[in-house]
Amino acid sequence: MKKHLCFYVFVFIVISCKKKESPLTFKNTIYNATTIETCNMGMCPELDIERLTALGDAKLADSINKAVERVLVSNLVINPDEIPKIKTLDEAIANFISSHRNYHDEFPETNAGYEFSSKSAISLNGSELLSIVFDTYSFWGGAHGYGSTTYLNIDKQTGKSLNTENLIDNEPAFLKLAEQKFRSQKGISENESINSTGYFFENDQFILPANIGFTENEMTLIYNPYEVASYAEGQIIIKIPLNEVTPFLKLSL
């Protein structure tokens, strides 16, 4: 009887431990010239990266961290063809430093240097949706730098990164709502061409931006420079109250 009791107690403890997951928490890790070892061995570009790292719930945290790393790598690597070959942030940083040094070897008279900064933060940590925002600035020796915002949306139940199709239900109806908000903000009447004031939506058809994010109160649509307008226009930011977009969302916030 005692043996059976001990067995049941053991099973109960094991099951309880398996069910109990550490809560999801986050920390920031800083990468700059003082923390990157390679920068002690020669010329280094201006680098300032705050990398958000998830801790706690092991499986979900691992999915989040891999997705965050993919965003940082894609933003940091200069040549898009090299992105599939570079798997980690450390590799991307090494590649960026190497590119910077090669640039100065080729143009030794230049005073300009490469720059890259990225700050990531939790925009929304909801019951089912995690939204992370990355604010990035890069300069690769051209006429000017480039500032952009990237959103990463993750299903907390599956750890899957979500695109617009995964997020939005009845996309045609939502597209109409978003276009109304865009036209209202930019002073473009319903009867006018969406490009009448200088935008360059392809085929004169309104489209959603590449980056859609969330806060506790609103959905944010961000068109980065060159996406639908000139560099001089800067970012175009459209904010829609959550109560208006909730009917179109596939996940609960």
Image (tube, rainbow, N blue to C red):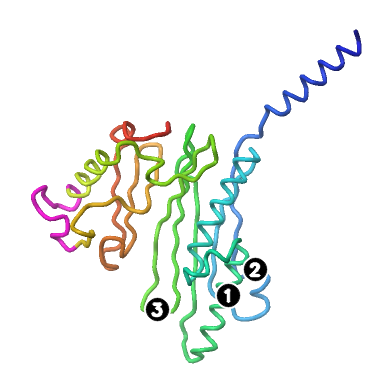
Residue identified by numbered label 2: 36
Q: Say which quarter of the image contains residue 40.
A: bottom right
Q: Is residue 146 left or right of residue 114?
A: left
Q: Amino acid at mark 2?
A: Ile
Label 2 vs label 3: CA separation? Answer: 25 Å
Q: Amino acid at mark 1?
A: Ile
Asked whether the residues under the numbered discs 1 and 3 touch, taking CB atoms below 8 Å apart as contact, a structural biologist would say no
Q: Amino acid at mark 3?
A: Gly
Label 1 vs label 2: CA separation? Answer: 10 Å
User: Could you tell me residue 49's position as x and y percent?
Assistant: 54, 61
Residue identified by numbered label 3: 142
Q: Residue at x 38, y 43 (%)?
A: 165
Q: Main secondary structure of the magenta part?
A: loop
Residue found at the very far top of the displayed protein? 1
44 in magenta: no
The label on residue 97 is 1
Q: Earlier in the sequence, mark 1 or mark 3?
A: 1
Q: Earlier in the sequence, mark 1 or mark 2?
A: 2
Give the number of the mark in front: 2 or 3. Answer: 3
Asked whether the residues under the numbered discs 1 and 2 touch, taking CB atoms below 8 Å apart as contact, a structural biologist would say yes
Is residue 40 positioned above or below 66 on the image?
below
Q: Secondary structure at mark 3?
A: loop
